[in-house]
Amino acid sequence: MGPKRALITGVTGQDGAYLSKFLLDQGYEVHGLLRRSASADVINARLKWIGVADAITLHDGNLTDLSGLIRVLEAVRPAEVYNLAAQSFVKSSWQQPILTGTVTGLGATNMLEAVRIVCPDARFYQASSSEMYGLIQEPVQSETTPFYPRSPYAAAKLYAHWMTVNYRESFGLHASSGILFNHESPLRGIEFVTRKITDGVARIKLGLEKKLALGNLDAKRDWGHARDYVKAMWLMLQQDKPDDYVVATGRTTSVRDFCALAFSHVGLRMEDHVTVDERYLRPAEVDVLLGNGTKAKEKLGWKAETTLEELVAEMVEADLARLKRHEHL
């Protein structure tokens, strides 16, 4: 009996990289789905940064191509499938609503259908999102809070979420969804506000820039570390019965306060450097998100291990180091 096999879609993203490392450390054989592009030379930069690029077997594939997914599953025969791939930048979803729906929504259904056809005994994880709560119906959001998506991205994620529930109830798949609240790291894409802040702070500290332009400083999010959150994904697939879980820290912080933490880490004041640019405002804002992770704590034994202050410091230090080495990620 060889090591357990896992297939990760979105393997080259932030969560894919951290999950790959976690599973490798658990003794798994890790396979990843790779969407080919013209930037193939840098597409696995996160896997290299975290030190696992050479330990993962990559397979060409795309969530929009069911036949390709079937071929990959037939080749890998995984015990666990983690569907992390998506068009995941919320602001872009208004400019690309059809692409977002096709990849983020229907793509998850393609993956579920491929699993049902090829390896129905495999355990399936769907990356759901706190953005599905949108215009919040309760001040603290749990698994039973009604959803109210406020972006094409959130609507696509909600479709994928309910299709995961549907395949679980219709076909008996061991399919679970993690409703993950915002989770960041040094591997976060530069287009996301947290990484934009820490990269901007590092540039200003090093004298490369003077100002940092941001959008809504008053939006509040429940921010944790991606390294902690991928463990929750794995724990869901170790349960006897599949289910859906909120994964969150239970603490909400404004963009303004996140920014202030990052600037203070390098001895600067955000008031001297931050400007507001309306180009970065969303057409429909999600004002505040705050997760109730009680179910994950009680049933999975999971809780966030990294504080917001530790997360911000780690991200700022990583960006300082990168810029000093003239590296980009």
Image: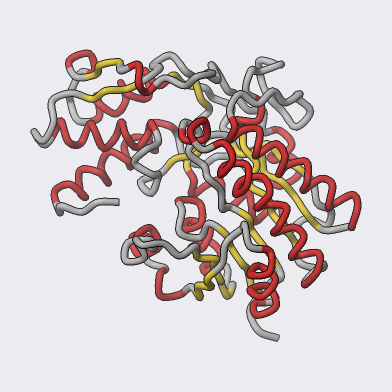
Q: Is 57 located above or below residue 134 in the figure?
A: below
Q: Residue at x 70, y 16 (%)?
A: 138
> Which residue is farthest left?
207
Residue 48, image x and y in percent? Answer: 35, 65
Determine which quarter of the picture holds residue 180. top right
Q: Is 142 located above or below residue 234 in the figure?
A: above
Quadrant of the drawing holding the N terminus: bottom right
Q: Is 35 located above or below residue 315 in the figure?
A: below
Q: Residue at x 63, y 28 (%)?
A: 291
Q: Would residue 122 appear left or right of 14 to someone viewing this image?
A: right
Q: How is the image coloured?
A: secondary structure
Q: Would residue 240 appear left or right of 300 to someone viewing this image?
A: right
Q: Would residue 98 appear left or right of 48 to someone viewing this image?
A: right
Q: Would residue 110 appear left or right of 319 to someone viewing this image?
A: right
Residue 227, image x and y in percent? Answer: 48, 49
Q: Residue at x 84, y 47 (%)?
A: 166
Q: Residue at x 40, y 36 (%)?
A: 192
Return the residue nearer the eye: 308 or 193. 193
Determine which quarter of the picture holds residue 152. top right
Return the residue nearer the eye: 47 or 43. 43
